[in-house]
Amino acid sequence: MKTFQAVGMSRVEGKLKLRWSNDPKICRMIYRSKGEKDILMIELSEPLTKKDCVQYLKHRAHEFHGDEHINVINEYLEKHA
Protein backbone atom coordinates (compact mmCIF):
# COMPACT_ATOMS: atom_id res chain seq x y z
CA MET A 1 0.00 0.00 0.00
CA LYS A 2 1.35 3.42 -0.94
CA THR A 3 2.39 5.75 1.88
CA PHE A 4 3.02 9.48 2.15
CA GLN A 5 5.25 11.76 4.22
CA ALA A 6 2.92 14.79 4.19
CA VAL A 7 -0.79 15.52 4.03
CA GLY A 8 -2.77 18.68 3.63
CA MET A 9 -5.26 20.67 1.61
CA SER A 10 -5.36 23.28 -1.08
CA ARG A 11 -8.08 25.29 -2.75
CA VAL A 12 -8.61 24.55 -6.45
CA GLU A 13 -11.08 26.76 -8.31
CA GLY A 14 -12.73 27.63 -5.01
CA LYS A 15 -13.04 24.05 -3.74
CA LEU A 16 -10.90 22.52 -0.98
CA LYS A 17 -9.13 19.30 -1.90
CA LEU A 18 -7.11 16.85 0.14
CA ARG A 19 -3.46 16.53 -0.86
CA TRP A 20 -0.80 13.88 -0.19
CA SER A 21 2.90 14.13 -0.90
CA ASN A 22 6.29 12.63 -0.21
CA ASP A 23 7.99 16.00 -0.75
CA PRO A 24 5.89 18.81 0.75
CA LYS A 25 8.27 21.57 -0.29
CA ILE A 26 8.11 20.62 -3.98
CA CYS A 27 4.38 19.98 -3.61
CA ARG A 28 3.77 23.53 -2.35
CA MET A 29 5.77 24.99 -5.24
CA ILE A 30 3.79 22.96 -7.80
CA TYR A 31 0.43 23.90 -6.28
CA ARG A 32 1.36 27.60 -6.19
CA SER A 33 2.49 27.48 -9.82
CA LYS A 34 -0.90 25.98 -10.74
CA GLY A 35 -2.67 28.87 -9.00
CA GLU A 36 -3.95 26.90 -6.03
CA LYS A 37 -4.67 28.86 -2.85
CA ASP A 38 -4.82 28.20 0.89
CA ILE A 39 -2.11 25.54 0.69
CA LEU A 40 -1.60 23.67 3.95
CA MET A 41 0.83 20.74 4.09
CA ILE A 42 1.76 18.98 7.32
CA GLU A 43 4.88 16.83 7.40
CA LEU A 44 4.38 13.51 9.14
CA SER A 45 6.81 11.84 11.54
CA GLU A 46 6.35 8.53 9.68
CA PRO A 47 4.86 7.50 6.33
CA LEU A 48 1.11 6.84 6.41
CA THR A 49 -1.51 5.55 3.97
CA LYS A 50 -3.98 8.04 2.50
CA LYS A 51 -6.72 7.10 4.96
CA ASP A 52 -4.34 7.25 7.93
CA CYS A 53 -3.11 10.64 6.72
CA VAL A 54 -6.67 11.98 6.69
CA GLN A 55 -7.35 10.55 10.14
CA TYR A 56 -4.22 12.35 11.33
CA LEU A 57 -5.57 15.60 9.82
CA LYS A 58 -8.84 15.08 11.64
CA HIS A 59 -6.98 14.93 14.97
CA ARG A 60 -5.37 18.28 14.13
CA ALA A 61 -8.60 19.90 12.93
CA HIS A 62 -8.32 22.61 15.60
CA GLU A 63 -5.55 24.14 13.45
CA PHE A 64 -7.85 24.74 10.49
CA HIS A 65 -9.85 27.84 9.70
CA GLY A 66 -13.43 26.69 9.65
CA ASP A 67 -15.92 23.92 9.15
CA GLU A 68 -15.18 23.59 5.43
CA HIS A 69 -11.87 21.83 6.15
CA ILE A 70 -13.49 19.47 8.65
CA ASN A 71 -16.31 18.70 6.21
CA VAL A 72 -13.82 17.71 3.48
CA ILE A 73 -12.02 15.42 5.94
CA ASN A 74 -15.25 13.81 7.16
CA GLU A 75 -16.53 13.28 3.60
CA TYR A 76 -13.33 11.47 2.67
CA LEU A 77 -13.41 9.27 5.76
CA GLU A 78 -17.07 8.38 5.21
CA LYS A 79 -16.42 7.51 1.57
CA HIS A 80 -13.41 5.34 2.47
CA ALA A 81 -14.73 3.70 5.65
Image (cartoon, rainbow, N blue to C red):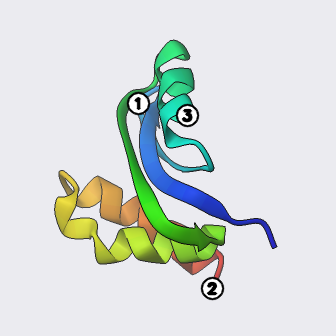
Marks 1/2: CA–CA distance: 26 Å
In this orientation, which residue lies closer to the viewer: 8 or 65?
8
Report the residue at 77% width, 66% height from top: 2
**39 sits left or right of 27 in the view:** left
Residue on which the image places disc 1? 14
In the picture, the disc for residue 81 is 2
Local crowd size for mark 1, using a 10 Å CA cut-off: few (<14), some (14–19), many (≥20): few
Rendered-image quadrant of the C terminus:
bottom right
Residue type beneath disc 2: Ala
- Label 2 or label 3, whichever lies nearer to me, is 3
In the picture, the disc for residue 79 is none
In this orientation, which residue lies closer to the viewer: 55 or 70?
55
Q: Position of residue 3 (x, y in %)?
A: 70, 66
Residue on which the image places disc 3? 27
Report the residue at 52% width, 14% height from top: 33
Residue 63, placed above or below residue 34: below
Rendered-image quadrant of the N terminus:
bottom right
In this orientation, which residue lies closer to the viewer: 61 or 7?
7
Local crowd size for mark 2, using a 10 Å CA cut-off: few (<14), some (14–19), many (≥20): few
Residue 79, placed above or below residue 40: below
In this orientation, which residue lies closer to the viewer: 11 or 33?
33
Q: Position of residue 37 (x, y in %)?
A: 37, 27
> Is the residue under label 1 in contact with that under label 3 (CB below 8 Å)?
no
Q: Quadrant of residue 16?
A: top left
